[in-house]
């Protein structure tokens, strides 16, 4: 039990500590640096001459009405190794923030000491023992509770902690951006695989048509009805079509393997379902450019980088002022174990430390200048990222309309090329047209249909880019919450 005298001592020490802390915390600390908002004039509506905006909502993957695409995107999010690495970086950033934040709190440690010693005494002025060695043995036990605390008078530690948590929020935004980007890459890889499959099918069909035409020409040539030139041209087209088919097949295999890598699978070139380009739903006018700032994770990351840079300015300025720390210790010390719970054996200590930088060769003020320059860089980067975001939306909106018109024109061209090919075949069989006209019509039909497939895939890519540019989420919020739970 602690004695009355020891209790009084503890109360006096505690009162002194509280008084010192209160007086120091009452001092003015270095103010947190802050920057004004984005210094950029943002129009109320998108400036695209063809449309104003597109409705942004969660679950943009579902807007393509392709269940297989939805499953593929979710598989990529679950198994992609680059995304898992980004998630690990986020966990590391969160731990780093907690480590830095711990400096705001006192450090408390407990200890126990035990020792046994022997001391020898020689030449003691004791009659009869002048030439003898006297020995004594004793024990010493102690327990202690020690506290160390840096008083954050000038806000240095608070600013350091704010910067660390802003860094963590940057990592959070980067992870969200990586997740969104992966979904977009996966969707576009799926569309590329579907396009490659359709191009392969078209090339195979063209090869069969060219072979059929060559057989017909050979039959006429054998009967002396057509010259050898027609046969050679027909056979040349068969060879060209065969080469194109092999090229399309190689492209399909390559695209599928790229998709499998995104999915975290072994790239064996085997994937089912990627053989159809989905229809494109019409866009719904809604939203304004300013909404992009609040939705895009890359803009959130740039803003948090600016906040971290501002906090580090405060940290660097506060480093110019003294550091004040307190150290306290209390415990018991005795030669018997039961002394450790006896208040009469109480020991304590209290110390304060003030450390003022005097001369460091200009390092501290140079650090202030460096952090201010970094903050200016972060502000310009934030503005640049915002402009890039607006530019991506404007470009995607423009491409939406132009590619739709382009696909419509190519559909008309393909229809006319098919009709022209049939007409040329009829006229050739009737002897009213040269074989060169037939070949030209066949090539036009192939080119128009191939370009139409390409443009359909480009439209799908642009729609994905538009969703990403506007910051649309991958799944509906209630679905994501259900998955998380």
Image: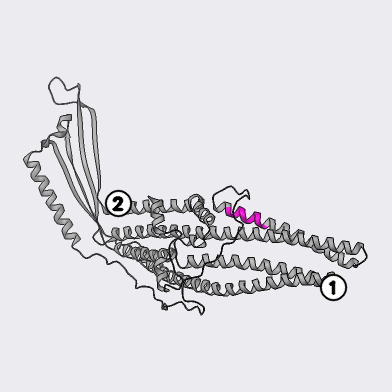
**Front label number (2 vs 1):** 1
In the picture, residue 372 is in which quadrant? bottom left
Q: In the figure, is residue 140 to the left or right of 64?
A: left
Which of the labelled discs sits on residue 102, or is there none? 2
Residue range in magenta is 251-259
Q: Is residue 255 magenta?
A: yes
Q: Position of residue 162 (x, y in %)?
A: 32, 60
In the picture, residue 114 is in which quadrant? top left
Q: Residue furthest right?
A: 224
User: Is residue 238 at least partly visible in the picture?
Assistant: no
Measured Cα–Cα span from mark 2 to mark 1: 87 Å
Q: Quadrant of the N terminus?
A: top left
Residue count near mark 1 (Cα–Cα under 10 Å), binned few <14, some 14–19, many ≥20: some
Residue drawn at (44%, 67%) of the image? 56
Q: Is residue 365 above or below residue 345?
A: below
- Report the front residue among 172 and 185: 185
Q: Position of residue 27 (x, y in %)?
A: 20, 64
Chosen colour scheme: one colour
Circle 1 residue: 434
Q: Is residue 214 above or below residue 347?
A: below
Magenta span: predominant SS is: helix
Of mark 2 and mark 1, the one earlier in the sequence is 2
Q: In the figure, is residue 195 to the left or right of 439?
A: left
- Report the front residue among 84 and 187: 187
Q: Secondary structure at mark 2?
A: helix
- Report the front residue among 437 and 258: 437
User: Is residue 349 at least partly visible in the picture?
Assistant: yes
Q: Residue furthest top?
A: 128
Residue count near mark 2 (Cα–Cα under 10 Å), binned few <14, some 14–19, many ≥20: few
Q: Position of residue 178 (x, y in %)?
A: 47, 58
Which of the labelled discs sits on residue 57, or is there none? none
Q: In the figure, is residue 453 to the left or right of 444?
A: left
């Amino acid at each position: 039990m602690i004695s009355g005298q020891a209790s009084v001592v503890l109360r006096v020490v505690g009162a002194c500590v509280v008084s010192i802390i209160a007086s120091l915390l009452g001092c003015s600390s270095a103010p947190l640096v802050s920057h004004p908002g984005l210094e950029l004039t943002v129009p109320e509506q998108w400036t695209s001459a063809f449309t104003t905006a597109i409705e942004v909502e969660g679950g943009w993957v579902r807007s393509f009405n392709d269940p297989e695409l939805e499953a593929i995107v979710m598989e990529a999010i679950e198994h992609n190794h680059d995304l898992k690495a980004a998630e690990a970086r986020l966990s590391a950033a969160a731990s780093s923030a907690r480590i830095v934040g711990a400096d705001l709190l006192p450090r408390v440690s407990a200890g126990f000491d035990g020792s046994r010693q022997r001391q020898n005494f020689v030449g003691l002025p004791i009659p009869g023992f002048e030439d003898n060695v006297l020995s004594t043995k004793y024990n010493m036990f102690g327990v202690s509770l020690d506290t160390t605390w840096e008083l954050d008078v000038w806000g240095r530690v608070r600013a350091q902690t704010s910067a660390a948590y802003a860094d963590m929020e940057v990592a959070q935004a980067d992870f969200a951006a990586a997740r969104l980007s992966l979904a977009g890459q996966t969707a576009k890889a799926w569309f590329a695989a579907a396009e490659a499959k359709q191009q392969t099918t078209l090339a195979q069909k063209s090869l069969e048509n060219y072979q059929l035409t060559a057989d017909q020409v050979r039959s006429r040539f054998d009967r002396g009805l057509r010259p050898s030139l027609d046969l050679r041209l027909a056979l040349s087209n068969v060879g060209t079509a065969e080469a194109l088919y092999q090229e399309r097949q190689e492209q399909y295999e390559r695209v599928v393997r790229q998709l499998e890598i995104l999915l975290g699978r072994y790239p064996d070139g085997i994937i089912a379902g990627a053989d159809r380009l989905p229809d494109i739903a019409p866009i719904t006018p809604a939203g304004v450019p300013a909404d992009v700032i609040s939705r895009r994770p890359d803009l959130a990351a740039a803003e948090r980088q600016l906040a971290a840079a501002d906090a580090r300015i405060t940290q660097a300025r506060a480093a110019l002022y003294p550091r004040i720390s307190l150290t306290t210790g209390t415990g018991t010390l005795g030669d018997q174990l039961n002394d450790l719970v006896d208040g009469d054996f109480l020991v304590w200590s209290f110390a304060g430390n003030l450390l003022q930088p005097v001369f460091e060769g200009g390092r501290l003020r140079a650090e202030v200048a460096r952090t201010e320059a970094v903050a200016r860089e972060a502000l310009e980067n934030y503005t640049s990222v915002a402009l890039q975001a607006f530019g991506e939306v404007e470009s995607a909106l423009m491409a939406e309309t132009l590619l739709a018109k382009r696909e419509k024109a190519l559909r008309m061209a393909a229809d006319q090329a098919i009709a022209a090919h049939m007409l040329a075949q009829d006229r050739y069989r009737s002897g009213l047209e040269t074989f060169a006209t037939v070949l030209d019509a066949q090539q036009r039909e192939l080119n128009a249909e191939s370009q139409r497939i390409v443009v359909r895939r480009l439209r799908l890519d642009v729609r994905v880019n538009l969703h990403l540019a506007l910051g649309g989420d991958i799944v509906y919020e209630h679905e994501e919450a259900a998955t998380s739970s």
